[in-house]
Amino acid sequence: MRPLALFGGTFDPIHIGHLSVAWEASELLDAEVRLLPANVPPHRPSPTATAVQRVEMLRAALRGQSRLTLDTRELERNGPSYTFDTLAELRREVGERPLVLLLGADAFAGLRSWHRWRELFDVAHIGVINRPGIDACMPAEVERAVAARRTDDPGVIRSQPAGKVIELVVTPLEVSATRIRELLAAGRDPRYLLPAGLFDDPMLLAPYRTA
Ligand SMILES: Nc1ncnc2c1ncn2[C@@H]1O[C@H](COP(=O)(O)OP(=O)(O)OP(=O)(O)O)[C@@H](O)[C@H]1O
Ligand SMILES: O=C(O)c1ccc[n+]([C@@H]2O[C@H](COP(=O)([O-])O)[C@@H](O)[C@H]2O)c1
């Protein structure tokens, strides 16, 4: 069955790294990919842009294609955006359809601090995306939990609803939202690190520019 993949993030702002890896993950898994902006990210300071501003940027970035879509459910919930809660809700909606949580290698390495992290495998597969500059060394506790779950076969992902971990080797792009926020705050113009749609309306990037 065609998997449904969720790519969660703060997207403060969305950049070409997000889009490119989500696109390639969709190709590698033959999956529908939804970008899932977090309302209150559980383990980091509050974003610079509001949830409404981040969604406006996502909509502008996704315009003109249909492979990547937007899922705003976490913005409709109060409190921290725990991924387990989101995936459990999605599981109830999709029945037996395979669900894949897409995570950059940095996010995956921090998995053991997540809310109910061991139970994530009951509701979804995890697709780990390589990211340059990230030490791929996994905490032993996480490696023990995932060792028997590893597969390199997208066919296995399609054949069962949840429970596997697959490494997705995509074109590495060393781009981060932190770097883009720094450039914008310094009055620079990182236009080729951002999707073109973000320049359609000058207000979209206003939260990051200093007066
Ligand atoms: N260039 C990239 N290559 C691979 N994965 C990425 C890349 N940028 C972000 N990700 C992944 O996208 C997800 C959402 O990331 P997030 O919105 O925090 O972006 P970020 O660029 O890491 O932001 P920040 O610099 O503010 O932490 C995470 O799983 C992260 O690992
Ligand atoms: O559920 C958790 O405990 C949890 C802890 C840390 C991060 N997450 C999710 O991981 C995704 C990437 O987070 P971030 O901070 O790298 O943008 C995003 O969807 C977060 O909601 C989730």
Image (cartoon, rainbow, N blue to C red):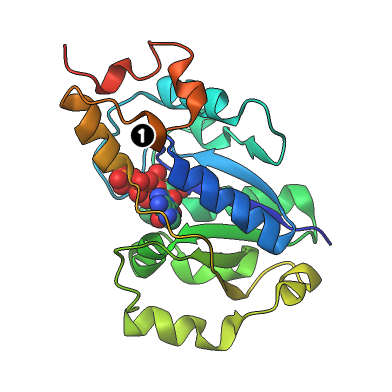
Q: Quadrant of residue 71?
A: top right
**Above-or-below relation of 31 to 108:** above
**Which residue bears the numbered disc 1?**
12
Q: Name the residue: 29% across, 19% down.
A: 207
Q: Is residue 133 left or right of residue 211?
A: right
**Above-or-below relation of 197 to 160:** above
Q: Nearer the viewer, residue 120 or 181?
A: 181
Q: Is ligand 1 less than 8 Å from the beta carbon at label 1? A: yes
Q: Is residue 64 left or right of residue 119?
A: right
The C terminus: image quadrant: top left
Q: Position of residue 197 (x, y in %)?
A: 51, 23
Q: Nearer the viewer, residue 199 or 56?
A: 199
Q: Quadrant of residue 88?
A: bottom right
Q: Residues within 10 Å of mark 1 (few under 14, many from 20)?
A: many
Residue 57 in view, yes or no: yes
Q: Position of residue 70 (x, y in %)?
A: 61, 34
Disc 1 residue type (three-letter): Asp
The number of discs equals: 1
Q: Name the residue: 54% across, 58% down.
A: 102
The N terminus: image quadrant: bottom right
**Residue furthest front as drawn:** 192
Q: Nearer the viewer, residue 206 or 197?
A: 197
Q: Identify the secondary structure beneath mark 1.
A: loop
Q: Position of residue 100 (x, y in %)?
A: 63, 60
Q: Position of residue 187 (x, y in %)?
A: 19, 22
Residue 88 in view, yes or no: no
**Residue furthest right as drawn:** 1
Q: Name the residue: 28% across, 25% down.
A: 189
**Above-or-below relation of 94 to 52:** below
Q: Quadrant of residue 181?
A: top left
